[in-house]
Amino acid sequence: MRVTNMFINYAHRGASAYAPENTLSAFYLGLQMRANGIETDVRRSKDGHLVLFHDDTMEKTAGIPGGVKDYTLKELRHILIYGQPGFVPDHIVTLEEFLYLFGYRDLTFAVEIKERGVEEDTLNLIRKYKIADKCIFTSFDYPSLVRLRELDKEIRLGYLFKKLTAENLQAAADIRCFQVCPHVDALDREAVERLHRMGYSVRAWGIQDEEAMKRCLDAGVDGGMTINFPDKLTAALERPAEAVGLNG
């Protein structure tokens, strides 16, 4: 069943337009910008620890070869993650550290599974911190979502995909997804209304600028959006409803 009135301003990997993505700097900055949600990504280190990191490789953010799977946690502790010029680089965070620091807060969490095999350990850690009811587990990788549904019949799943196709929507229905998460370019008001009639919460991703952000709001997306600049979304949401397309 679709839950209403839960539009979430998800700081995407934290406030990643400004601070090094998926680091404490970015997460705290997102809160300062009054995001009411955080989106982050889970991978496994060489020695089995769950860490928050998006890309397959570390070249873009750390300037080194390989991915987090090629380094132990001890080695990862010495690697700096870089963001925009002017921001101090920061370190990789484990999922457990993140949950300890942010799990008790009044936030919604979009936890994206980036590789197969981390589903059970991710779910167990979130259960440990008793915040499964504040999480939506997402992935582009459908088998990871299937595995999560096998592990727990009640958690909220969100299927990430680029295009709205009958196949994607059927796949989401087959595992009782709470939310569908298409690319913003696939969404307009008609598409969102159709998805709502099907019972889904709708969250958009791929918002690269304020024009795309406004299109998303105008379309009537209810489940929020993952956004690198949560300060700008906060400002837009504080304008009169008719100015940001929230009147229906």
Image (tube, helix red, strand yellow):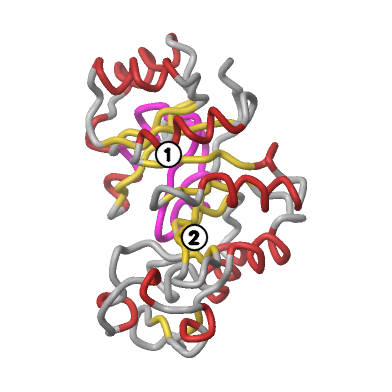
Q: Nearer the viewer, residue 172 or 199?
A: 172
Q: Nearer the viewer, residue 73 or 79?
A: 73
Would you place residue 127 above or below residue 102 in this image? above
Q: Quadrant of the N terminus?
A: top right
Q: Quadrant of residue 180?
A: top left
Would you place residue 116 above or below residue 27 in this image? above
Q: Which residue is mark 2?
A: 231
Residue drawn at point x = 55 percent, y = 72 percent: 93
**Horizontally, is 130 left or right of 109 in the view?**
right
Q: Position of residue 44 (x, y in %)?
A: 47, 63
What span is colored magenta in the figure? 214-243
* Residue sitting farthest toward the front: 47
Marks 1 and 2: CB-CB under 8 Å?
Answer: no
**Horizontally, is 39 left or right of 130 in the view?**
left
Number of other residues with Cα within 10 Å of mark 1, as a class: few under 14, some 14 to 19, many 20 or more: many
Kind of residue sitting beneath label 2: Asp
* Residue sitting farthest toward the top: 197
Q: Which residue is mark 1?
A: 144
Residue drawn at point x = 44 percent, y = 75 percent: 19
